[in-house]
Amino acid sequence: MPQPIVIKYFLGTDKTLYLFFGHTEKILRDANKLTISTSAHRGQQARMQTLKLNYPVHTLDAKELFAAGSMLSHEAFQQARLKYPPLASVFYSFLKHGSVCNDLQDMMGQPPYDTIYGDTDDREAVLAVLARSRVQPIVLDSLDYFRQFDCNTYRHMLMVFALSLLLARHFAVPGRDLEQEILSAGPTHDLGKICVPLPILRKSTPITAHERRHLKHHTVAGFALLAWYSGDVHAPAARIARDHHERSNGTGYPEGKKLSDILVEIIAACDIYDALISPRPYRPISFDNRTALEELTELAGKNYLSGEIIQLLVALNRKNKPSAKTCVVSLERRGTPPAENNYGVTVADDDQPATAQKSPTVSPL
């Protein structure tokens, strides 16, 4: 493993531990309370909506950070960090870890990504950004875990990371560096799935209501793990893990709030797109690219997702590479979703009468 990058820190006169990495200052820990924030929140106590856990949150080495029924308050994070202090100052190269570089380049060369990355400048620019990516051990450990036990999630985490960087390269927002925010988050949006039993993740038959609730737990579990590890409840990685299943019209989870953060909206669109076009245990055949884009266009039309982001994604799928602003997105449905798709199908729990329900195809779990 390459030499870690150890970040310099000092204890301020206000008994706050300050950490420096690049040009970003983060307040890590206060002697009396958790006052964690990014530079955008410097000097302010972090504020967040308190979430309740339906299932425990644990690390891969079986440390239970938060028990089922816990409230994710600042006090709970403080206690978890005191009981299990993370190595928050050590970062490693993402692209040099294991087979990540080869795996990514192989995936980028397969349809439809070969068209999306058909522009050499785009491909080289994304790979150059990825080469700068430095991630914490919890991220690399999760990738190793999924590569061994759930290759679909491993592949998905890599491609959502790479695709979101490409979209950020073409999506300018005044006052924000979306590319840097995504880079600092790393491939973490589904990291919380380490807290979901593997038989549920790999199940090919319809899941039960209990299993669906456990699957949805991955959002708050990822938030809890990443906020605990980084010491920052407002960090891009923690926000993305928590909110990437929220929707613009407020129909998502875990909080059912209206998604308005363009950073998370980019991840959400990439998450659904890659899930549709990729192998999944719950369906024998993936969506073809046309049908996947039509699904996303319909979701944008119903205000589940950002129309601007979907328009950009459609433009990147065109071989002539039109600009997103001039790209005309057809509303005609010509594709056909794959047969025997068990996504959204929920059967009764073992102790309940046998029924089956089909949820709207809003986004794969």
Image (cartoon, rainbow, N blue to C red):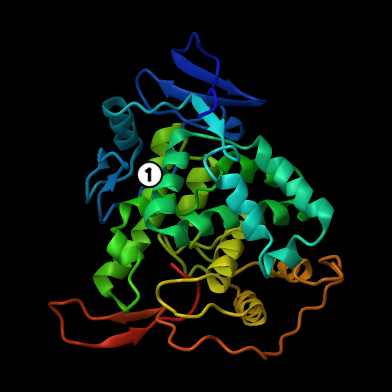
Q: Residue at x 63, y 57 (%)?
A: 106
* Of the pair 35 and 296, the residue shown nearer to us: 296
**Left or right side of 148 for 180:** right
* Residue 312 position within the rendered picture, expressed as x and y whole percent measured from the top left: 75, 65
* Residue 177 can be seen in this image: no
Task: Look at label 1 and name its amino acid.
Answer: Ala
Q: Is residue 31 above or below residue 241?
A: above
* Residue 218 can be seen in this image: yes
Residue labelled with disc 1:
224
Identity of the residue furthest to the left in this view: 351
* Residue 23 position within the rendered picture, expressed as x and y whole percent measured from the top left: 67, 25
Q: Residue at x 60, y 73 (%)?
A: 303
Q: Which residue is drawn at 66% across and 42% down?
A: 130
Identity of the residue furthest to the top in this view: 13
Helix, strand or loop at disc 1? helix
* Of the pair 123 and 315, the residue shown nearer to us: 123
The image quadrant where one finds the C terminus is bottom left
* Of the pair 211 and 360, the residue shown nearer to us: 211
* Residue 321 position within the rendered picture, expressed as x and y whole percent measured from the top left: 84, 67
Q: Is residue 46 above or below residue 166?
A: above
**Left or right side of 69 for 261:** right
* Of the pair 314 and 303, the residue shown nearer to us: 314
**Mark 1 burial class by Cα count in 10 Å: few <14, some 14-19, many 20+:** many
Q: In which quarter of the image is residue 345?
A: bottom left
* Residue 187 position within the rendered picture, expressed as x and y whole percent measured from the top left: 54, 48
